[in-house]
Amino acid sequence: MKLEWFVAFFFIPTASLLAKKTTAASSTKWWSIVLSPGMTNVVTDTQGIIDVVDPKLKVLNKRQRRLVAQNQGALMAITRAVRMAVSECRYQFQNRKWNCPTSYKERGQTSLFGKILNSGCRETAFIYSITSAAVTHSLARSCSEGTIESCTCDYKYRGESGSDWEWGGCSDNVVFGQRIGKKFVDSGEKGHDLRHTMNLHNNDAGRRTVSSEMRRECKCHGMSGSCTVKTCWMRLPTFRVVGNLIKDRFDGASRVTMRNDGNPSDSENESSFVPYNPSHKQPGERDLVYFESSPDFCERNAKFGTPGTRGRECNATSLGVDGCDLMCCQRGSDSTEIKVKERCSCTFHWCCKVKCEECTSYRTVHRCL
């Protein structure tokens, strides 16, 4: 019995041991397509395998290249998705200590989100979730726009209608977006350790957030706008709505660790991880998960590639995260008066010009010391 206890105690995997495997690795290389202008210059061989003309731009793995070859137009949709994710990440964190810096460079190599990905923290969880959500959203919307040859509108909504409306129009094909998005985004994740389990969960949380927010949208028909009958279809939310929801999940993210046996679950309904605090509830399908505390974003951190908040603009009158007290980490701030030139007193002249004057004003800007 004592020997069994000894083995169980010393060989149960812990989050700290599993964290040693944490790397940004190859699963995120595809994000770099937005840093490679020539990425859209591709050729397809006789077996349908897509390749890139410039060898330096081969940021997709073999399975990803096959997927975009089989779904012509998907590459442009995925490229657009990465730009959407970057823009949304910057918007959601514009007033935070970590403001989603991108295009980190070291030793000639460029990583879109930088070395923060080497940490299993909640910021990394958000990045994975928002990029996965963006791919699903962009692919689904591209189907209804007719820019992906292998898919069309989602016509399954042809069943029972309402008393004053009927199904019609072109519904966004979120089923295609989820299916191809999952294959593409998850294809680089290998292994069963805590980091890969975390990545796959957060990827899926992003996709589920998109699909759960599909809404019915209608257009009226009838004499003189009487709306005698409405034609309705299912429409994706704006990506800002998706970003807001994932940001809410970020604020309430769950810290997790592997199950005691350290093995992946055998059932799709059983999670491979459990809450770090046993008194907390098991995270849901759309909850974000992480297993390491976030770095201190106050000062420059070379290990995680974070720039710190020195020189960041702050709000001197705010008590929130954008306020100078919190943003500057109690270091204080200085103020500078800057001159701002703006268009003003605009008038419309027939036909068809708008003429404006240039007005000068002064604004006080506060920056962290």
Image (cartoon, rainbow, N blue to C red):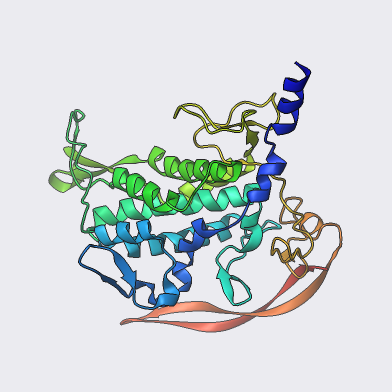
Residue at the top extreme, as displayed: 1
Residue 111 lies in quadrant: bottom right
Residue 103 lies in quadrant: bottom right
> Picture coordinates of residue 22 (x, y %)?
63, 51
The quarter of the image holding the C terminus is bottom right
> Picture coordinates of residue 360 (x, y %)?
64, 81
The one nearer the camera, 55 or 367, is 55
Seen in the picture, residue 126 relative to 76 is either above or below; the reply is: above
Looking at the image, how many numbered discs can be counted on the residues? 0
Residue at the right extreme, as displayed: 331
In the picture, measured across the screen, residue 191 lies left or right of residue 335, that is left
The residue at 54%/41% (across/down) is 192
In the picture, measured across the screen, residue 257 lies left or right of residue 187, that is right
Residue at the left extreme, as displayed: 223
Seen in the picture, residue 9 relative to 78 is either above or below; the reply is: above
In the picture, measured across the screen, residue 53 lies left or right of residue 286, that is left
The residue at 61%/33% (across/down) is 262
The one nearer the camera, 260 or 242, is 260
Seen in the picture, residue 278 relative to 34 is either above or below; the reply is: above
> Picture coordinates of residue 339 (x, y %)?
69, 80
> Picture coordinates of residue 72 (x, y %)?
25, 62
The one nearer the camera, 263 or 276, is 263
The quarter of the image holding the N terminus is top right
The residue at 61%/60% (across/down) is 100
The reply to whether residue 34 is visible in this rendering is yes
The reply to whether residue 245 is visible in this rendering is no
